[in-house]
Image: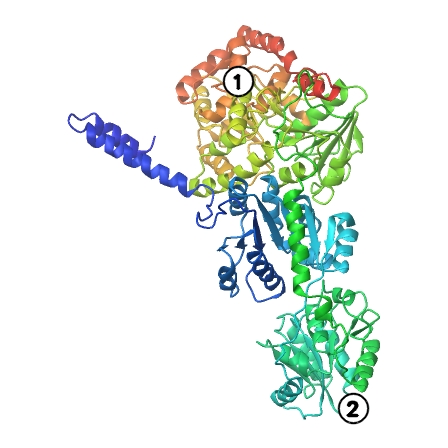
Amino acid sequence: MNVGRKVAEFVGRIPGLKGLATSVQLALRRQRARQRKGLGHPTIPASWVPRGTRPHVILVGHEATRSGAPMILLRLAKHLSSTAGVGCRVVLLADGPLREDFAAVAPTIVVPAVVDVFAALADVLRHSAPPCVVVCNTIATARVAEQCRLQGVPVVAWIHETSTVIDEFFGGRKTVQRMARASRQIVCPSQLVATSLTEAYGIPPTRILVVPYGIDAPPAAMDRAEERRSVRKDLGLSPEACVVLACGRAEQRKGVDLFVQLAAKVVDRKTAAGHDVHFVWVGRWDDQAKPWARHDVRQLGLSECLHFVGEKKHPARYFAAADVFVMPSREESCGMVALEAAAVGCPVVSFDGAVGAAEMLSDEEAVFVPYLDVDAMAAAVRERLDRGRRPVGAIPVFDRYPWSRCLDEVTEAVRSAVETPATGRAEERFAAPRGGEVWKQADGRAVLVIAYGPPPIPGVGKVEGTGLRSWGLAAALAHAVPGSDVTLAIPAWYDLPSMPAEFAGVRIARWGHDTLAELIAEHDMIVASYCLGDDSVRIADAVLEHQVLVWDAYVPIHIEVCARRSANRHGEAEAFERDRRIWETCLKRGDYFLCATEAQRLYYMGVLAAIGRINPVTYDDDPFLIVPYGIHEAEAVPAKRPCSDLIATPGAWKILWFGGVYPWFDIGCLLEAVRTLAEKHAVGLVIVGAKNPFVQHPDFEKCHERMMKMIEDPAIRPLVHLVDWVPFHERGDWYLDADLICFANQPGMENLLAWRTRVVDYLWTRTPLATNGGDPLSEEMIAAGAAVRVDATDPAALAATLAATLGDATKLAAMRKAADAIREKYLWSNAVRPLADVLRGSRVG
C-alpha cells in the first residue's frame, strides 16, 4: 500500500473529512490512469487513419532522404494518389527532406522505428474501415511487414537490395525470411536481385515479380552542347577535353577504388583525336573510403586529372556533358545512373553480372566487361572515347522503360495482394473443429521440443528450470508414445562439446536463428515456450498449417515479471509493455497450451479471451492441457553425505535451502530464525545455488546481495554454508542428507499461480518440507501432511515451528510417508499423459 492511499484512509477516518478523502483517492486513481495510459501502446494519429470504403495502399519507407528508394516510393505515392478508387497513406521510419514532398501527395506520418509502434500501426490498419494493403519499401522495413502479417494485413514487399547488402547491413537470412513470410508478393527491380534472393535465401522464383524501374526522358529544353561547355568550364578543363564520368556515393561497393585504378590506366595517353582525358566522380564521399582513395590518387599522380566534385543538385548536366559513363560497382540492384546516362546518349561501361541495369540496356548503349577486370574496362573506355558519342537510338531507353509502365505493374501487384487471400499457416485460431471431429492432432509422430537451456544429461554441467522442463517433456513423450520420434533442440550458443547425439531415446539437436525454421519443418508437433521474446516469434513464424504448435505456458509470465518488485518499476513497465505484445502475439497462434495446474488453466482462459484467441468461433475448443512439471522416475540413490560434511557437529539439525534466491522468494526470515534456533540446539543452514548462473538481471542480483549482507552478521555467518550450483545428478545427495528443506515464498498473485519446480524436485526424495505455502503444490503437500506450514514473517515463530518439527522424529517420518503417497501422480510418465494423447491422436476436443 503506497503513502497516498494511507493518507487517504487516515483522512477518511476523521469526522467531516470523508469528502476530502474521496477527492484524494480519486486524484490518485486519475494519476495512476495517466501513468497506465503513458505506458500503453503508441497511438497513430486519428487524422491519418484511412476512412471511407475505398481500398487504401499504405506506403512504408525506411527514410525520407533524397536517395534512390525513397525517391522511387515518392513516385509510387504520386501515381496512386492519381489513381481512381484507391486511397494512399505514407509511413516513414525516419524523417528527412523528402517528407514534405510525401505530405504534399498523401497523408504522411513519421514514426519511430520500434516494434511497439509497428504493432500499433498494424492494429490500426487491421481495424480500419476500408481494406488496406501495405507496401514495404526496402528490406529495412521487414519489422513492419512482420507486425502486419501477425495482424492479418496483406503486404507487398518491394525489395531493392541484393544479398550482399542485406547480409552486411540488414541482418541477412532472418530479415529476408521475416519479410518473405509476411508478403503476398515480392517485387524486385531486376533479375539480378531476384536471383540473389533465390540463391542466397531460397525464395522461390514464383514468388518474385521482376518490375524494372522506369527512366525519365531528358528535358526537351536541355542543350547538350551548352551543358558540355559549361561543365568543362566549371571543372577548369579545355572545351575539347574528354570526360569519363561516374556517379553515386564514393564507396567501396560502388568501386571508387577501381575508378582510381581505371583512371591510372586511361589518362596516360590522349584519345585518337589527341584530347586529354579527365575522370569525374559526382557524389558524396563515404568516410571509410575517402582516405585511401585520396591516398591512391596522390600516389598515382592523378590529382590533375581526377576530380571528385561532391553532390550536385542537377547531376543530369554531367550526364549530358560526359563522353563515357563508367559504373565500376561491384554490385548494383539496378544502377539508375547508368540508365540516366544512356537516356542522354552517353555510352555506358560496366562489369558483367554486377549491375541490374544491364538487363535494360542494348549493346549499342552499353558494354560490359569481365567482372573486376580493370584492364578490360580501360580498353572499353578508350574504344568508346575514340568512337565518340552517337545519337540516341531509334527506341531510347526512356521509351522502352517509362516510369508509367513500372508504376502500373507495381500497382497491379498491390491490387492482386488485396484480392488474393494469404496461404500457409493461419496466424490466429478462428476456426473450430467440425461436429464430432477430433480436435487438431499431429499428422505424424515426429516431435520437436525446443529448449532454452541445457538438459540434465551426461556432458552437461549446470542446468536450470526451463532446460529441465524441456528434457522432462521430451523424455516422457518418447517413453509414453512408442514409435514416436522425439527431438530435443538446445541453443547452439551453449558450449557443450561432449553432448551426445541421442540419450534415453531422445535425439539431441542444436538450434540457432539460421537453422530453426529448417529444424521445425522436419517435425509434426512443436513444443516450446511462448515467452522467449523474438525466439518465440521465430518459432511461431516457422510453424506451418499442418503442424501442431504447443505452447508451454507453465510460467505465468505476465504475473511473474510483475512480481520482481523491481527498483526501476517505470523502466520495467515499459519493457513489460514491449514484451507483452510479443507474448500475446505468440499465444494467439498456439494450438495447445500446457498449464501446470487448474489455477493456471483458469488464468490462461482469461488471457486468451482477452486477446481474442478464445472467441465465438473457438468457444467450444478446449486447447488446455494440464501438464505439470514432473518427477523423474529413477529413485535417488545416495552416494555421499554433503550436508553432514559441512555441518560436522554431532546431532546438529541440517536445514537445506536448495535453489536460487529470486525476487519471488524470501530467505531473510529463515536466516534470522536459524540464529534463534542456534541458541538452543546445534543447527546449520546449507544454501545451494543461491545465485542464478544464467541470469544477471539487476533484480536477481539485488536479492543475492541482500542475502549476502545479512550473512555478514557475526551471529549468522558461522551457521550458514554457501555452496555453488552442484551437478544435477548429485542433487539427491543433498536432499536425502538434509533433515528438513525450507523455503519461503513472497506472498502475492505470482505465488498463487506458480508451479514451483524446486518443490516438485523435493517431492522426488520425499524430504520433509517447511514452507509458508501459497503456491498450489506446497498447499497440497501441507494438506496431505507432507509439509509443515511456517510463518515466514516472524523469525521467532519460524524458529519455533522448525524446532518442533526437527525435534519430532515421528513427525518427520510421517511427512516422508505422506510425500510418498502423493508423488506418484507427478511422475513424468503420468504428468505428460494429456500431451501424449494429442500425439497419439486420441484426444477429443
Question: Residue at position x 57%, y 20% from top?
Answer: 759
SS under mark 2: loop
Report which residue position mark 2 lands on.
270
Residue type, numbered disc 2: Lys
Residue 821: name its quadrant: top right
Where in the figure is residue 557, as x and y percent of width and height? 54, 31
Question: Residue at position x 45%, y 14% from top?
Answer: 801
Report which residue position mark 1 lands on.
776
Where in the figure is residue 733, as x and y percent of width and height? 65, 22
Circle 2 or circle 1, nearest the eye: 2
Q: Badge 1: few (under 14), some or many (20 or more) residues near its Cα, within 10 Å?
A: many
Residue 87 located left or right of residue 437: left
Can you see residue 313? yes
Viewer-closest of 821 and 258: 258
Where in the figure is residue 798, as x and y percent of width and height? 43, 18
Which quadrant of the rendered structure holds the N terminus? top left
Residue 361: name its quadrant: bottom right
Residue type, numbered disc 1: Pro
Residue 825 vs 289, above or below: the answer is: above
Residue 776 vs 508, above or below: the answer is: above
SS under mark 1: helix
Q: Looking at the image, which residue sits at the far left?
A: 16
Which quadrant of the rendered structure holds the C terminus? top right
Residue 90 vs 355, above or below: the answer is: above
